[in-house]
């Protein structure tokens, strides 16, 4: 039984009903609908903290999904899982793939910046620290340009470190 059919929480049930209705009404191919069902089940598993099942569903959704924009969200969610598990290299790779398919995905840009900032904070070599912080700034600037009302902490960091003129975002 698909995870989305096992949900006992009201929000998950509501999401499943809405998603199923959309799937029935949208003029999509069988393959597109199947890809969405795997994506939906991946999101449900991810929400429940079952990352292995979520990744399996996302991989299957990626195999079926042909739309680059939709693929970018699948890759983004896979990056979230690896980031939450501390596998920053894999997370960065999935975010990079997501951004390549959809350069207007501010959350992938933001999460990439968060990882680079974290790595910079942990680094003992001042040159590597500067390299990580520069990468963080680059990705945060791109994210903020797409979503100027978001990422306030990043905007403050950019301003206080002199890495960007904050007024340039508005």
Image: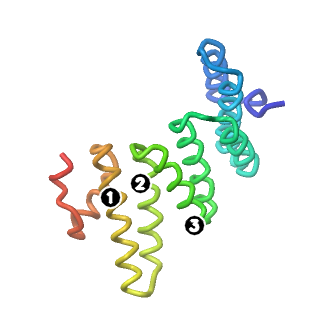
Mark nearest the camera among 3 and 2 is: 3
Q: Total marks drawn?
A: 3
Above or below, comparing residue 56 to residue 165 in the picture: above
Position of 96 with respect to 132 (left or right) is: right
Which residue is denoted by mark 1 in the rendering? 154
Residue under the image location 49 percent in, 45 percent down: 101
Residue 107: x %, y % from top left: 44, 48
**C-alpha separation, residue under disc 3 versus residue under disc 2:** 16 Å
Name the residue at the right extreme: 1
Q: Which mark is residue 107?
A: none
Name the residue at the bottom extreme: 125
Q: Which mark is residue 110?
A: 2
Which residue is more in the foreground, 93 or 130?
93
Secondary structure, mark 2, is: helix
Residue 164 picture quarter:
bottom left
Secondary structure, mark 3, is: helix
**C-alpha separation, residue under disc 1 versus residue under disc 2:** 9 Å
- Figure quadrant of the C terminus: top left
Does the residue at mark 3 contact the one at mark 2 (Cβ under 8 Å)?
A: no
Which residue is more in the foreground, 122 or 75?
75
Residue 10 picture quarter:
top right
Residue 102: x %, y % from top left: 45, 43
Residue under the image location 37 percent in, 67 percent down: 135
Q: Which mark is residue 89?
A: 3
- Which numbered disc flags the more N-terminal residue, 1 or 3? 3
Q: Label 1 crowding class (10 Å Cα cut-off): few <14, some 14-19, many 20+?
A: many
Does the residue at mark 1 contact the one at mark 2 (Cβ under 8 Å)?
A: yes
């Amino acid at each position: 039984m698909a995870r989305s059919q096992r949900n006992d929480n009201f929000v998950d049930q509501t999401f499943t009903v809405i998603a199923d209705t959309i799937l029935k009404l949208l003029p999509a191919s069988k393959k597109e609908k199947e890809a969405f069902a795997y994506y939906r089940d991946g999101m449900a598993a991810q929400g429940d903290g079952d990352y292995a099942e979520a990744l399996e569903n996302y991989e299957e959704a990626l195999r079926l999904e042909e739309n680059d924009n939709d693929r970018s969200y699948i890759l983004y969610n896979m990056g979230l899982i690896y980031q939450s598990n501390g596998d920053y290299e894999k997370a960065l790779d999935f975010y990079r793939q997501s951004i390549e398919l959809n350069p207007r995905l501010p959350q992938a840009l933001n999460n990439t910046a968060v990882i680079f900032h974290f790595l910079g904070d942990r680094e003992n070599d001042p040159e590597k620290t500067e390299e990580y912080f520069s990468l963080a700034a680059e990705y945060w600037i791109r994210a903020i340009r797409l979503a100027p009302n978001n990422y306030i902490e990043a905007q403050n960091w950019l301003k206080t470190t002199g890495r960007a003129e904050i007024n340039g975002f508005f």
